[in-house]
Amino acid sequence: MLDRIPGAPSQPVNVVKDLF
């Protein structure tokens, strides 16, 4: 899930927006 986002640890908020 978070593996497809390279900037996950850098932008946790962006990850949530990307998943939803």
Image (spheres, rainbow, N blue to C red):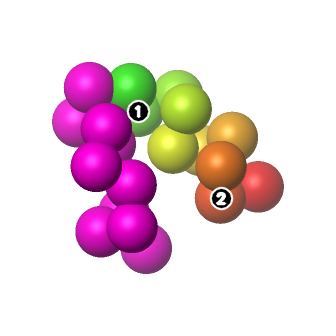
Q: Mark 1 points at which residue?
A: 12
Residue at x-position 31% and y-position 38%: 7
Q: At 41% across and 33% down in the image, what residue appears?
A: 12
Assess disc 2: are there few (<14), some (14-19) or many (≥20) residues with their C-alpha within 10 Å of its C-alpha.
Answer: few
Q: In terms of secondary structure, what is the magenta stretch mainly?
A: loop
Specify whether 11 is left or right of 10.
right
Residue 3, placed above or below residue 7: below
Looking at the image, the residue that sits furthest to the right is 20
Residue sitting farthest toward the left: 9
Residue displayed at 38% across by 55% down: 5
Q: Which of marks 1 and 2 is nearer the N terminus?
A: 1
Relative to the observer, which residue lies in front, 6 or 14?
A: 6
Residue found at x 69% / y 40%: 17
Q: Is mark 1 on a helix, strand or loop?
A: helix
Taking depth in this image into account, of 4 and 17 the one nearest to the observer is 4
Q: Mark 2 points at which residue?
A: 19
Q: Find the magenta span and give its range.
A: 1-10
Number of residues whose C-alpha sits closer than 10 Å to that of mark 1, classed few (under 14), some (14–19) or many (20 or more): few
Percent from the top left, x then y, of residue 8? 32, 42
Q: Does the magenta stretch include residue 7?
A: yes
Q: What amino acid type is highlighted by mark number 2?
A: Leu
| Label 2 residue SS | helix
Under mark 1, the amino acid is: Pro
